[in-house]
Amino acid sequence: MDHQIILVVDDDHDVLSAIRDVCATQTDQRVLGAHDFAEALAILSNTKVDVLIADVLLPDEDSKNGVALSVEALDAWPDIALVLISAEPIEMSGVHSQRAVCLQKPFGRDVLFSAIEEAQLKAGPKRATDTF
């Protein structure tokens, strides 16, 4: 089986490192990280990402956030699994309520892994076979 590629996006270095480290414990995962919208978009434009874990509130001069990033990700990779994270409660509507899994920080390893699995199921049959 090929490695799944997970992109973690968070402007908080400690949170980004912690999530990357936890995801890297799975031997079939390649984990990439980005600190902002532009850096993440550059990775998404050059790399087939299987799972996007993005903070909803990303600093960006154009007010682009994790939700906008997930829209860009869906445009580039329609079968991507989406996990949106935030320190505040998240309410989603439209396509995001059907496709994204939302987590409120802080969360533990098992909760994160369950959210990734749920996001893969929401992404469709192909993703559902790529269990985390």
Image (cartoon, rainbow, N blue to C red):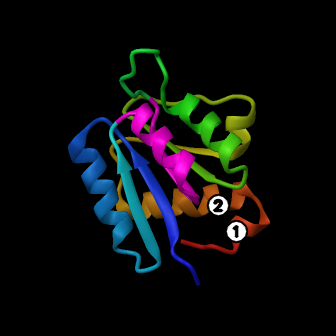
Q: Secondary structure under badge 2?
A: helix
- Residue drawn at (67%, 45%), measured in percent from left and top? 76
Q: Which residue is mark 1?
A: 128
Which residue type does callout 2 highlight? Answer: Gln
In the image, residue 56 lies at what x, y percent? Answer: 46, 31
Check the image and report above or below for 124 versus 131: above
Between residues 114 and 62, which one lies in front from this camera angle?
Answer: 62
Q: Quadrant of residue 130?
A: bottom right
Between residues 33 and 100, which one lies in front from this camera angle?
Answer: 33
Q: CA distance from mark 1 to mark 2?
A: 5 Å
In the image, residue 49 lies at what x, y percent? Answer: 56, 57
In the rendered structure, which segment of residues is drawn in magenta? 36-56
Which residue type does callout 1 highlight? Answer: Ala
Left or right of residue 79: residue 26: left
- Residue drawn at (69%, 37%), measured in percent from left and top? 97
Q: Which residue is mark 2?
A: 120
